[in-house]
Amino acid sequence: MKVLISINTAWNLVNFRAGLIRALINAGHDVVAVAPPDAYVERVRALGCRFVPLPMDNKGTNPIRDLLLLIRFIRLMRRERPDVYLGYTVKPNVYGSIAANLCGISVINNIAGLGSVFVRNDWLTRLVRRLYALALSRSATVFFQNEDDRAQFIEGGLVNRKITDRLPGSGVDLSRFEVAPMPSAAAPIRFLLIARMLWEKGVGEYVEAARQLRRLGLNAEFCLLGFLDVQNPAAINREQMAQWCAEGFVIYLGETDDVASQIAAASCVVLPSYYREGVPRSLLEAAAMGRPIITTDAVGCREVVDDGVNGYLCKPRDANDLALKMRQMSELPASARSEMGRQGRQKMEREFDEKIVIGKYLEAIAAISR
């Protein structure tokens, strides 16, 4: 079958859907990947699929631009004539699905977190809800990454319960993210936050917790890794990051394609997000590598941590509680942190293996072909 997969960046295709694309190709499907072009286009092509660039204003709310995007999707569907359309992220899910429906193409959606828009109750939220209801009305399968999002869509009348299913996030490649030895017990404990640098990811709370702990005399490193200046109203700019680093409490490590080496150098991975996550990939990768986790008791994040077993849960938007949990982690014997990491790896093997996600997609596509 011809499978067209669309998402909001080529970077996203490489980092979150590479395993699925390879599996689809290995199963004999013809895969076409669609996204706005960026520096990762050649790496998408290296996966063995064909890449089609599609301009997309990911964060904009201009109705004319969105109408033009819908028209581009309709033209794309008519030209490519795929058997199945796989949609990810808001605009490909909404406008790509509507276009596929108009062209008689089967649709499989993945709702990977609701971001910040569903937290509010303004005109934009109401509009997005209506668009989702229209887009999902004829889908063959709609995958959700956590039960909270699934329940919200069903109870809000946005999707028929019968076509929904649950995925363990985007899954984690356990062969790529293998258990790494913990850093030397003689070295200062190193905390690491991996995320796009957005206020909603809890970056401000992380910096404030680091400030508190350093002033209390804790011998620790507080590192941040991820994209700055992203296209998002909640983005943290370079000037703000430079100011924090100049204070001497945190270390900004920049961006990298080799996330595994940074996780290996960390003692604990922290994500104090209050963004409406699906299931954060950074936490899955950290747990797969045997690192304990501190994250918020919030939708998407709490799925990865059994509190007190493979990490700690903290209160959202609460730098004081985050600092408390980070101090508790630092006061554990190195052997206890290693045991937390071991429990995390086992949890990934049981619940979050990428093979589970790939298997569900192959089943959903096979059901369409019957």
Image (cartoon, grey):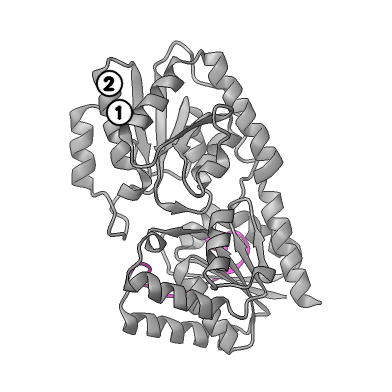
Residue name at image x 23 percent, y 33 percent: 245
Q: Check the picture and name the quadrant holding the N terminus.
A: bottom right
Q: Which residue is mark 1?
A: 210
Give coordinates of residue 247: x percent, y percent.
Answer: 18, 29
| 105 drawn magenta | no
Label 2, residues with CA under 10 Å away: few <14, some 14-19, many ≥20: some
- Residue 182 x, y percent position in the rendering: 53, 21
Question: In the current view of this chain or complex, which residue is farthest to the right?
Answer: 370
Horizontal arrangement in the rendering, residue 109 relative to residue 195 (left or right):
right
| Disc 1 to disc 2, C-alpha distance | 6 Å
Question: In terms of depth relative to the viewer, which is nearer, 226 or 25?
Answer: 226
Residue 198 at least partly seen: no
Q: Is residue 73 above or below residue 184?
A: below
State whether residue 300 appears in this view.
Answer: yes
Residues in magenta, as a range: 44-59
Q: In this rendering, is residue 223 above or below 162?
A: above
- Furthest-front residue in view? 155
Q: From the image, tell me which residue sits under label 2.
A: 214
